[in-house]
Amino acid sequence: MQLKFDHISRSESTIEYKLTVDSNGLGILTFCGNYKHGSQGNVDGFFMEEVTSCALKHVLVKSLMVDLRNLEYSWGNTIINTISLLLTTNVPVAVIYSDKCKGIVDADEGFFVKTELEALDVINKH
């Protein structure tokens, strides 16, 4: 099932998202696009935070895999809000990243992985 949050303001963000939830409650939230540099990226960060918050609060989502592999990101602080949400939730979470967005990755956080298989492993260990 694919879910859309119509009430979220896109503002100036060009980031796209897709949220699907399988029959076991595994949500897969995919972000793609170009996260703008520095303070210009604030609108992207706030948009991603709002979408992530809605996904985590959705009754059908029992665990969440966030796929950032097609997100172009180099720097900007507002994305930290999204990562903070993921760190503090009670829902099992994993974040898949690629070289396009490796600037997001904090080596101290064990939920950053490179593949879907690794993400499922992190989620299942929670």
Image (cartoon, helix red, strand yellow):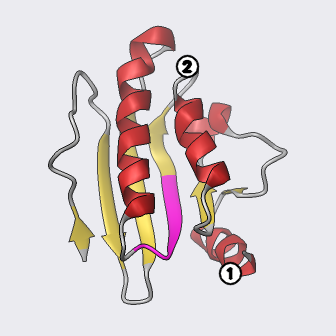
Amino acid type of disc 2? Gly
Tell me the element at label 2: loop
Q: Is residue 100 visible in this depiction of the protein? A: no
Q: Is residue 120 visible in this depiction of the protein? A: yes
Indicate yes or no whether the magenta region holds residue 11. Answer: no
Identify whether 63 is placed above or below 101. Answer: below
Residue 1 coordinates in the image, percent (x, y): 25, 77
Tell me the element at label 1: helix
From the image, which quarter does the C terminus lie in?
Answer: bottom right
Identify whether 67 is placed above or below 35. Answer: below
Q: Which of 9 and 100 is in front in this view?
A: 9
Residue 73 coordinates in the image, percent (x, y): 52, 29
Amino acid type of disc 1? Asn
Residue 77 coordinates in the image, percent (x, y): 58, 21
Q: Identify the residue at horizontal 50%, vertical 48% (top origin).
A: 68
Crowd tier of the residue under label 2, counting other residues whose Cα lies within 10 Å: few below 14, some 14–19, many 20 or above: some
Identify whether 94 is placed above or below 88. Answer: below
In the picture of the structure, the residue carrying the numbered disc 1 is: 124
Question: Residue 93: which disc?
Answer: none
- Quarter of the view holding residue 117: bottom right
Relative placement, left or right, of 26 versus 5 is right
Range of magenta residues? 61-67
Q: Identify the residue at horizontal 55%, vertical 34% (top origin).
A: 81
Relative placement, left or right, of 74 versus 106 is left
- Quarter of the view holding residue 71: top left
- Quarter of the view holding residue 83: top right
Identity of the residue furthest to the bottom in this view: 23
Sequence-first tag of 1 and 2: 2
Q: Identify the residue at horizontal 36%, vertical 66% (top origin).
A: 58
Residue 9 coordinates in the image, percent (x, y): 21, 34
Crowd tier of the residue under label 1, counting other residues whose Cα lies within 10 Å: few below 14, some 14–19, many 20 or above: few
Question: Residue 76: which disc?
Answer: 2
